[in-house]
Image (tube, rainbow, N blue to C red):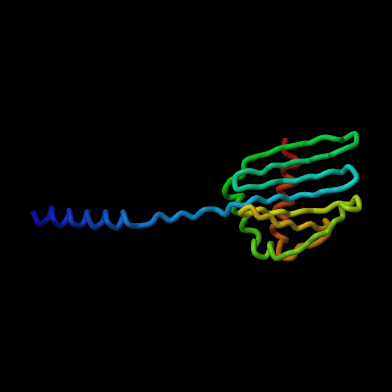
Amino acid sequence: MKYFIKVGLFFFISMLFIGCTDKITIEQEKFTIQFGSECGWCAGQEYITITDSKVKYERIIPCGENKKTTTKSRELNSYEWEEISSSFDYSLYKSLEYTACNVCADGCDEIIRITKDNTSHELRYSFSDEIEGMENFRQILLELMDEMRKLN
């Protein structure tokens, strides 16, 4: 009888501890990354838009005999998202100010735009510019852009 009481008491105390523990879940940060280029003189725009589950490619040629819009997309797995989202410091990114306007004179700008919590911050710069602290992030984005161009 004492054995059953001890087992019952142990079971009861174990259930209290299990029932009282908080479930800890770590959510991935939710933000959208847009990367690409914008050029004047009918050259158009080319962007990838990246979320935690998808990458979308869009190429827009607004005028001329090559006028068209191309759109492609593919799923993004959690490992790819982790690589992208951990490749830059969001606080550093928000502190950077690059506001080139080469497109204003029919040139081209490369753009990184991140939207988080309905707030957007944009870096607009020349292709040849090095973005301080964003080298690895930019390289990953360039590789993903190249992959999406080749995607059928």
Identify the residue at image location x=57%, y=54%.
29
93 above or below 69? below
Identify the residue at image location x=68%, y=62%.
94
Q: Quadrant of residue 57?
A: top right
73 above or below 9? above
Q: Considering depth in this image, is 150 or 76 the residue closer to the camera?
A: 76
| Horizontal and vertical percent position of residue 3 | 12, 55
Left or right: residue 118 versus residue 27 is: right
Identify the residue at image location x=80%, y=40%.
60
Q: Considering depth in this image, is 109 or 138 the residue closer to the camera?
A: 109
| Horizontal and vertical percent position of residue 147 | 72, 44
How many numbered discs, if any?
A: 0
Q: Considering depth in this image, is 114 or 12 the residue closer to the camera?
A: 114
| Horizontal and vertical percent position of residue 88 | 66, 60
| Horizontal and vertical percent position of residue 12 | 22, 54
Q: Considering depth in this image, is 146 or 12 the residue closer to the camera?
A: 12
Left or right: residue 87 versus residue 110 is: left
Q: Residue furthest front?
A: 118
Identify the residue at image location x=75%, y=46%.
47
Q: Quadrant of the C terminus?
A: top right
